[in-house]
Image (tube, rainbow, N blue to C red):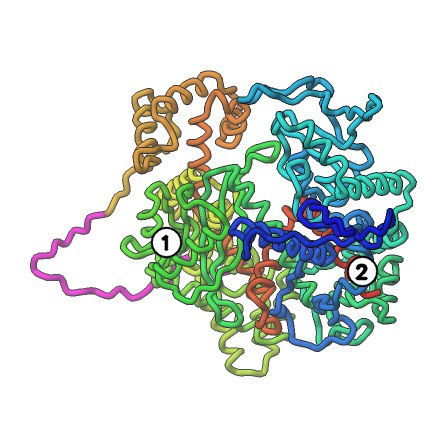
């Protein structure tokens, strides 16, 4: 007998022989339709995609965990292009598969390799690890700490806010009720009060693949079905697996017996070793860069002749330092593939240190808000036009307010027109994230491409920002005025020609120079400067103070030299030039004039010089010239007569033949003498209230652009009146005033802004000129192929060494040490 029973989607056939079942056959269900519906196709496709994505995620977890940042290194060499046997392996780029040494199960990579993670390679953000919102992006160290301490619950929350259905979270959900009425704490369940959602801690942190529900992803807040969803989740296979990982990791961490404990300890020791090595290498780089010394020689091999200053310092340090001794031993025995001694690593460290200094400078500039730029150009050894860019700002970081002029780098200029220089400068300011709208001053030399009122750089900046005041370099202007004054007087040109002849006759022979040194004690003759006229005081001073001794030296040259031309030249200089009373008078006059001008020029070249100081110095200089015109000549003649009597020279001007010119019929025979008006007394006068108010409104108009101004004239006038009333009497300079009002910044905000703008305006390009001295030291004939990045890095470290000395670059060393320790472990 055959019995057919319909069972679910199929049929069960039973062949019965008495009461014995012979076989059971389950028939497949007969489909209702021949083809799947659209919904069924979409569902199947979704399941296939989820499975494929989950597989890809699992396969990539090891690759993602052990992936490293590509170490950047400059391909341009800073010194001579040389080979490298010992030290060329730093640029290996670590192309070896980092996954070769990884044999752990993908499921346990995030847990078991916790201690060997990217420690300190990237700075860990300051986030709340107990906030469920951050559980999706925790680092390995954060997960370790979270596992050890466990997820935190807010016990004060009894119930959450009511939703639109009238349901809410209840703390009773933390408890699971078993079938026998016993209770069990759901320690994996966490409620976020801020998001009003539930999270599964273990599934959120340890799950692999795509999330299966809100509890392990964005959170769950369907409070109507919450009870059923929690029961369904806690009996799931994925939840059991994640709970097991959580408990196992907690137990291993508690016993300090993680799987990779030995590897982690080795990694830690290796990282500490490399940290100490890098610290010493950075110190060597700083030392060489600070003093503008060359790094490399003709080769890059340790303990080889001509290996340069850098490796030479490494060899010297190895004799006294145990860390460096061990490092050199590893390098010589080929025990390490990366060792931070090659030129590429030098370039990278130089660039990183230079960038760190520039970042600190930009940070100060942005804090000051207002800034000015100083530009100047000069060709380097490789015949490239280099433009030095200096930024001037008021620094409020120190204990007292100071004015800073900081070097930002050299810019290669191909187009030296006003437009070309303007575009290069704007591009650099944009790359430094400096707003041109905050620029309040610009200072250049007297070149037409810079100061031109139609197409110059200053005009183009003023078109873009009318509040960007332009001022010519005070030192350049003073130098040009002095040069023009001397070149318009024939006797002055003859005087300086004689001084140069005097220097030449001694400087072109070691024997004649010895005669000069034997007779002139403490001073020596110097050649005339063709660019800085005020520095000619150094050429005049030995003649002014040691004229008799110089004539003795010339007399010895006449008696001992065998060259007739030299004898004649020495005789002429001794008897006619240096023995002429007119020459003595000119020496005395020019020595007095250049002394005053040199003092004023030195003050104008100071970094912290401000506009009012420049005006005061120029006024003093003008006052001196006017006074000297009235009374200085007679005083100079008296001093000249004293010198003439000391050296035995006739203290009278030589009489020259009078040349009579035939007069025209309409010329008068009487000669009118030119008289000079008495000198006006320059005094600092106190402004009355009307004048003060007028100045405030003029300053507001000058700082106004597109309806906005840096100050308010009425408020500034009120603040200045208050400052005048309460300012202590002993404070009498702008810096002390700024210190006083800065301590009361909330009381005088517009006063601070006015001072910041006025103190920011530069008056000289001396800082840019000083940077060129470093350029000539760094980019020499032997280092003419130096890359621009290396040049800027070395120049920044050298010029702004004080900033670098006060900075903490521990983070840089930590990053380098971690990368190198990991790379060494992989090669081992």
Q: Quickly name the residue at label 2.
A: 102
In the image, residue 614 lies at what x, y percent? 43, 41
Does 612 appear above or below 774?
Answer: above
Between residue 795 and residue 661, name the one nearer to us: 795
Q: Is residue 725 visible?
A: yes
Q: Where is residue 57, by image quadrant?
A: bottom right
Q: Where is residue 750, by image quadrant?
A: top left
Q: Which residues are magenta?
A: 646-673
Give the structural element (helix, strand or loop) at label 2: loop
Q: Is residue 434 left or right of residue 298?
A: left
In the image, residue 598 lies at what x, y percent? 48, 50
For the stretch drawn in magenta, the main secondary structure is loop
How many residues crowd mark 1 within 10 Å: few (<14), some (14–19), many (20+)? few
Q: Is residue 276 visible?
A: no
Which residue is located at x 44 percent, y 55 percent? 427
CB of mark 1 within 8 Å of CB of mark 2? no
Does 169 appear above or below 544?
Answer: above
Which residue is located at x 76 percent, y 52 percent? 2
Q: Quickly name the residue at label 1.
A: 481
Between residue 611 and residue 363, name the one nearer to us: 363
Mark identifier at residue 197: none
Give the structural element (helix, strand or loop) at label 1: helix
């Amino acid at each position: 007998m055959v019995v057919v029973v319909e069972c679910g989607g199929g049929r069960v056939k039973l062949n019965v022989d008495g009461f014995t079942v012979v076989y059971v056959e389950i028939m497949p269900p007969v489909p209702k339709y021949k083809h799947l519906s659209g919904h069924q196709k979409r569902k199947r496709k979704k399941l296939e995609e989820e499975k494929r994505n989950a597989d890809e995620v699992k396969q990539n977890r090891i690759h993602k965990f052990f992936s490293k940042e590509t170490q950047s290194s400059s391909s341009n060499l800073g010194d001579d292009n040389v080979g490298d046997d010992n030290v060329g392996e730093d640029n290996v780029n670590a192309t070896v598969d980092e996954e070769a040494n990884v044999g752990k199960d993908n499921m346990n990579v995030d847990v078991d390799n916790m201690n060997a993670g990217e420690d300190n390679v990237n700075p860990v953000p300051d986030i709340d690890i107990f906030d469920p919102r951050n559980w999706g992006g925790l680092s390995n160290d954060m997960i370790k700490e979270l596992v050890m301490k466990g997820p935190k619950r807010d016990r004060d929350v009894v119930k959450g806010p009511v939703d639109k259905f009238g349901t809410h979270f209840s703390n009773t959900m933390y408890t699971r009720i078993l079938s026998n009425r016993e209770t069990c704490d759901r320690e994996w369940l966490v409620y976020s009060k801020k998001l009003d959602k539930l999270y599964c801690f273990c599934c959120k942190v340890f799950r692999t693949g795509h999330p299966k529900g809100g509890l392990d992803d964005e959170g769950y807040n369907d409070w109507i079905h919450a009870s059923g969803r929690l029961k369904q989740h806690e009996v799931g296979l994925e939840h059991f697996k994640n709970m097991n990982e959580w408990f196992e990791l907690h137990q291993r961490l508690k016993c300090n017996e993680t799987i990779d404990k030995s590897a982690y300890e080795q990694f830690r020791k290796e990282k500490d070793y490399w940290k100490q090595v890098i610290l010493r290498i950075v110190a060597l780089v700083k030392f060489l860069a600070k003093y503008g010394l060359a790094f490399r020689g003709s080769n890059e091999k340790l303990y080889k002749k001509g290996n340069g200053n850098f490796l030479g310092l490494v060899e010297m340090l190895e004799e006294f330092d145990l860390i460096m001794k061990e490092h050199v031993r590893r390098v010589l025995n080929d025990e390490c593939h990366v060792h931070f001694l090659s030129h590429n690593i030098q370039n990278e460290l130089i660039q990183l240190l230079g960038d760190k200094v520039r970042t600190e400078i930009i940070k100060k500039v942005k804090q000051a808000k207002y800034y000015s730029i100083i530009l100047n150009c000069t060709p380097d050894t490789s015949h490239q036009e280099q433009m030095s860019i200096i930024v001037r700002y008021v620094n409020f970081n120190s204990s007292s307010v100071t004015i800073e002029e900081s070097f930002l780098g050299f810019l290669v200029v191909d187009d030296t027109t006003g437009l070309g220089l303007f575009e290069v400068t704007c591009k650099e300011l944009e790359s430094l994230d400096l707003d041109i709208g905050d620029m309040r001053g610009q200072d250049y030399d007297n070149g037409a491409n810079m100061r031109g009122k139609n197409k110059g750089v200053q005009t183009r900046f003023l078109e873009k920002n009318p509040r960007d005041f332009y001022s010519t370099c005070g030192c350049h202007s003073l130098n040009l005025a002095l040069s023009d004054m001397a070149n318009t007087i024939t006797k002055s040109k003859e005087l300086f020609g004689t001084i140069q002849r005097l220097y030449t006759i001694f400087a072109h022979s070691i024997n004649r120079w010895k005669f000069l040194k034997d007779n002139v004690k403490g001073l020596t003759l110097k050649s005339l400067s063709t660019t800085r006229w005020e520095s000619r005081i150094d050429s005049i001073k030995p003649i002014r103070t040691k004229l008799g001794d110089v004539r003795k030296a010339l007399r010895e040259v006449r008696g001992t030299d065998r060259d007739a031309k030299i004898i004649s030249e020495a005789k002429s200089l001794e008897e006619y030039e240096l023995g002429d009373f007119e020459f003595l008078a000119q020496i005395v006059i020019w020595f007095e004039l250049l002394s005053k001008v040199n003092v004023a020029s030195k003050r104008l070249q100071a970094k912290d010089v401000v506009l009012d100081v420049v005006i005061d110095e120029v006024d003093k200089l003008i006052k001196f010239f006017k006074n000297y015109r009235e009374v200085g000549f007679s005083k100079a003649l008296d001093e000249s007569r004293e010198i003439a009597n000391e050296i035995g020279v006739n203290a009278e001007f030589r009489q020259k033949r009078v040349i009579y010119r035939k007069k025209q019929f309409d010329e008068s025979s009487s000669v009118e003498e030119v008289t000079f008006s008495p000198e006006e007394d320059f005094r600092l006068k106190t402004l009355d209230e009307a004048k003060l108010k007028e100045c405030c409104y003029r300053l507001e108009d000058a700082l106004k652009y597109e309806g906005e101004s840096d100050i308010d004239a009425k408020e500034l006038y009120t603040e200045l009146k208050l400052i005048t009333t309460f300012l202590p009497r002993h404070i009498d300079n702008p810096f002390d005033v700024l210190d006083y009002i800065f301590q009361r910044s909330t009381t005088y905000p517009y006063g601070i802004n006015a001072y910041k703008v006025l103190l920011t305006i530069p008056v000289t390009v001396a800082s840019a000129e000083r940077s060129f001295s470093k350029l000539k030291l760094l980019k020499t004939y032997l280092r003419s192929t130096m890359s621009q990045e290396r040049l800027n890095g070395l120049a920044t470290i050298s010029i702004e060494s004080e900033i670098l000395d006060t900075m903490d670059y521990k983070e840089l060393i930590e990053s380098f040490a971690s990368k190198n320790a990991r790379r060494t472990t992989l090669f081992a």
